[in-house]
Image (cartoon, grey):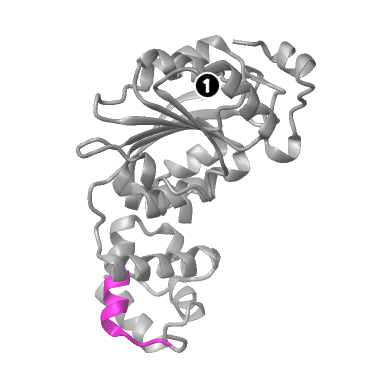
């Protein structure tokens, strides 16, 4: 595979800061990623952001069908020259946030084993989309992300890092922080430390579609008003004072407690009680 130096000089490629292009060059970290990606024989691997092909080169050794998604045209051309002739590699020039994954899902019981080193500005919207919209098609999501975001994904209730993203991860998946990655493992080096993580979507969420919608309405109301009491957060979210007080009491909570201290189980219980009350100022 061409080195970064060759890519930069031969193809005139320059990493774009605006696109979050920081390329993993640490062979030890690449080896660790290779070792933890073990797709079942029925699965298809999907790499998000093929980049220079450093990780792609490791993934093709597994001889599983591999979809590589890359949106940058120069990087895509490079990937096409390097891997385009391999029969089990399919290159897709697309924005992962707009790409329909349906055509890439293998026959049951197979699913997509997803892996990638993504631009960090995509982390929250991509993970949210994959967990909420694609979870039935994906076996696991293994990504290089900002360490601070990894800590939020794995945070416990009541901690400073616990927030809407933490609830989302806990509700839809099992989360694992696999290993930290130093900033100097990349070229150019980002200003932040990184971590390689895995989210394994749960087979079935705790609530049905309507219940899930109500839960995340509650989550938004709470975490958009972090410093307010739970009662005031609920009223700010559109519930009437009476409905909020009744639900809080039935949930065995105090009105003055702050909503961001509640764990997932309490949030689910409270959302069901609020749904039962069915009283809002702005339905």
Q: Position of residue 263 (x, y in %)?
A: 35, 55
Residue 14 vs 245, above or below: the answer is above
Seen from the viewer's position, the closer of residues 273 and 217 is: 217
Based on the displayed image, in which of its 4 quarters is residue 211 positioned? bottom left
Q: Residue at x 20, y 37 (%)?
A: 109
Relative to 231, residue 31 above or below: above
Q: Position of residue 238 (x, y in %)?
A: 47, 82
Along the line of sight, which residue is nearer the eye, 56 or 179?
A: 56
Q: Does 80 appear in magenta?
A: no
Residue that lies at the very extreme toward the left in this rendered image: 109
Q: Can residue 9 be seen by looking at this rendering? A: yes
User: Is 274 covered by the magenta stretch?
Assistant: yes
Please tell me which residue is depicted at 29% across the width and 66% down the height of the picture.
209
In front: 22, or 147? 22
Q: Position of residue 64 (x, y in %)?
A: 34, 21
Residue identifier under label 1: 84
Q: Measured along the vertical axis of the image, is residue 256 above or below residue 16?
A: below
* Dot 1 crowding, Cα within 10 Å, few <14, some 14–19, many 20+: some
SS for dot 1? loop
Q: Position of residue 21 (x, y in %)?
A: 68, 31
**Residue at point 33%, 40% (across, down):** 105
Q: Is residue 7 above or below residue 225?
A: above
> Is 169 left or right of 149, judged from the image as shown?
left
Extent of the magenta region? 270-280
State which quarter of the image contains the N terminus. top right
Question: What residue lies at 47% left-to-right and 87% top-to-bottom?
Answer: 282
In the displayed structure image, the side of residue 139 where residue 222 appears, left or right: right
Q: Classify the position of the C terminus by image quarter.
A: bottom left
Majority secondary structure in the magenta region: helix
Whether residue 157 is visible: no
């Amino acid at each position: 595979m061409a080195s970064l130096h060759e890519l930069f000089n031969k193809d005139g490629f320059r990493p774009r800061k605006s696109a979050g292009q920081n390329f993993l060059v640490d062979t030890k970290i690449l080896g660790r990623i290779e070792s933890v990606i073990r797709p079942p024989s029925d699965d298809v691997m999907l790499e998000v952001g093929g980049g220079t092909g450093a990780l792609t080169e490791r993934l093709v050794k597994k001889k599983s069908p591999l979809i590589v998604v890359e949106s940058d045209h120069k990087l895509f051309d490079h990937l096409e020259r390097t891997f385009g002739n391999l029969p089990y590699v399919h290159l897709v020039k697309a924005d992962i946030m707009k790409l329909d994954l349906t055509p890439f899902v293998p026959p049951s019981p197979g699913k997509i084993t997803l892996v990638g080193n993504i631009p960090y500005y995509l982390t929250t919207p991509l993970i949210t989309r994959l967990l909420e919209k694609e979870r039935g098609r994906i076996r696991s999501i293994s990504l290089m992300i900002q360490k601070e975001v990894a800590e939020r994904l794995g945070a416990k209730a009541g901690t400073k890092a616990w927030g809407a993203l933490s609830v989302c991860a806990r509700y839809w998946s099992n989360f694992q922080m696999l290993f930290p990655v130093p900033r100097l493992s990349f070229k150019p080096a980002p200003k932040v430390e990184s971590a390689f993580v895995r989210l394994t979507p749960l087979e079935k969420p705790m609530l049905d579609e309507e219940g899930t919608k109500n839960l995340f309405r509650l989550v938004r109301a709470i975490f958009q008003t972090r410093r307010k009491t739970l009662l005031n957060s609920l009223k700010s979210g559109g519930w009437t004072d009476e409905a909020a007080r009744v639900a809080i009491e039935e949930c065995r909570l105090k009105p003055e407690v702050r909503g961001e201290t509640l764990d997932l189980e309490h949030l689910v219980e409270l959302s069901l009680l609020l749904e039962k009350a069915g009283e809002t100022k702005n339905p």
